[in-house]
Amino acid sequence: MNRAKITIVMPAYNAAKTLRSTVDSIPKELNAKILIVDDASSDNTVQCAKDLGLEVLEHKQNKGYGGNQKTCYGTALKTDAEIIVMIHPDAQYDSRLIPALILPIELGICDIMLGNRIRSRKEALQGGMPLYKYLANRLLTILENLLLGQNLGEFHSGMRAYSRKVLETIPWEINSNQFVFDEELLIQSAFHNFKLGDIPVPVKYFKEASSISFGRSLIYGLATLKMLFFYILAKWFGISIQQFIPKNDHV
């Protein structure tokens, strides 16, 4: 099988201590283009990326997690990439699994693939996932599966791959600049009947790994519920909502 052309994007913020290990773990046989978008880090993330010979885009002002990804995907779509992989550069996700992550997309089985950290409750908690994050992850994922008609192990992964068609269809540019961006994109994809799948990945929480606070987690959860409500209005009642209108139909 001829491998698809891959661009790997990393939305980076203060990732100097973990960037190298994340990049070094990416299988060389992928021959992937790697793009780092630095969101005005206060450490030397940019210099570390340049030392690794990577392409780096710098935000002079912090644009937020979602705003960072907008730059990631907008830049990736300017390349000839057929699959765009997003992985956090904090070494929390195992880069060695990227070939397995993208294979169902290459074979035309799925359009989006996620790394699923919740293989079992014991494994998730032993990997350092805080109990409140585990419980919130489970509750939101169950609700999202139910409302969206999916069967994913988790919706809240920082390791995911998209076919080019997904990012050319979904109007992600008008999504939030905050952490809920990821959920908005998945909910939009389910609305447009893209096929979602996942693979198991190990859970690795440690000091240098990125993690949002309880307060931000609460805001994230409420914003996810709001997007699900919009999905119901658009999917079940046919109400026109901008976030669910394909890019080509936007005026």
Image (cartoon, rainbow, N blue to C red):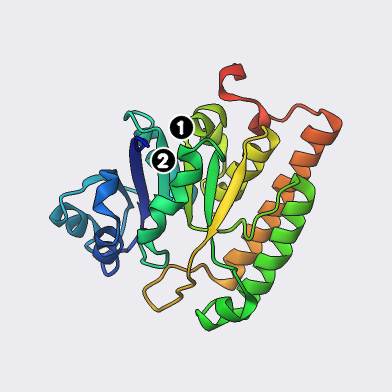
Tell me the amino acid under the disc marked 2: Ile
Q: Is residue 173 left or right of residue 119?
A: left
Whether 236 is drawn above or below 207: the answer is above
- Residue 200 appears at what percent x and percent y? 53, 63
**Image point (76%, 46%), residue name:** 149
**Image point (30%, 56%), residue name:** 26
Write down the quadrant of residue 82 in the picture: top left
The residue to which callout 2 is attached is 84
68 and 168: which one is in front? 168
**Image point (27%, 66%), residue name:** 21
Write down the quadrant of residue 230 in the picture: top right
- Residue 129 appears at what percent x and percent y? 54, 76
CA–CA distance in space, label 2 to label 1: 7 Å
Q: Secondary structure at mark 1?
A: helix
The residue to which callout 1 is attached is 164
- Residue 7 appears at what percent x and percent y? 34, 41
The reply to whether dot 2 and dot 1 touch (C-beta < 8 Å) is yes
| Residue 16 disc label | none
Q: Is residue 199 left or right of residue 59?
A: right
160 and 225: which one is in front? 160
Q: Is residue 51 left or right of residue 247?
A: left
